[in-house]
Image (cartoon, rainbow, N blue to C red):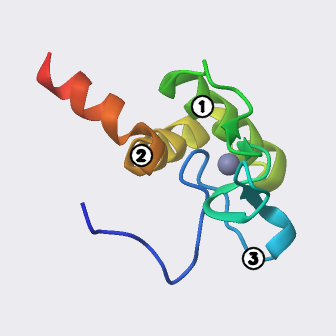
Amino acid sequence: MTRQPLAAPSCQSCGVNLKKPTEFGTTATRCIDINYCRYCYWKGEFTEPDITMEQMIEKVAKSIVAQSKMPMEKALTVAGELVPTLKRWQVEAEAEAEK
Ligand SMILES: [Zn+2]
């Protein structure tokens, strides 16, 4: 559980790369939370607390398509490999594996 890609911080919810301080999420005390981007985590809460891992994969895939013109099918594969490795979804992925 210590494996963390610290070299290039990325949001542990949607996988977006975080470069500028303004791109990071914030805690309830308005400090920067280095684990998440501002679109996923704001003032100590997830902006979409009920989103499932599948929905996030689809959301990430759509943003990949928008940014890189990658075909949706391929983007879904990329997102499907990325999203389950992120911290937010680890618990869900483990629960899923136990079924
Ligand atoms: Zn995010």
How far from the left and from the top, in percent, is residue 55? 59, 22
Mark 1 Cβ and ligand 1 under 8 Å apart = no
Label number found at residue 81: 2
Q: Residue at x 51, y 84 (%)?
A: 7
Between residue 39 and residue 59, name the one nearer to us. 39
Q: Is mark 3 within 8 Å of ligand 1?
A: no
Q: Position of residue 23 (x, y in %)?
A: 81, 64
Q: Which mark is residue 56?
A: 1
Amino acid type, label 2: Glu
Q: Secondary structure at mark 2?
A: helix
> Relative to 89, is 29 above or below?
below
Position of 96 with respect to 81 (left or right) is left
Q: CA distance from mark 3 to mark 1?
A: 21 Å
SS type, badge 1:
helix
Query: Looking at numbered disc 1 in the image, what kind of residue is underneath it?
Result: Met
Which quadrant of the rendered structure holds the C terminus? Answer: top left
Which label belongs to residue 19? 3
Q: Quadrant of residue 13?
A: top right
Q: Nearer the viewer, mark 1 or mark 2?
A: 1
Classify mark 3: helix, strand or loop: loop
Using the numbered discs, state the Cα–Cα distance from disc 1 to disc 2 in whole angstroms: 12 Å
Closer to the chain start, of discs 1 and 2, is 1
The residue drawn where x is 68% and y is 37% is 45
Give me the C-alpha separation between circle 2 and circle 3: 22 Å
* Side of 95 relative to 18 (left or right): left
Q: Residue at x 38, y 70 (%)?
A: 4
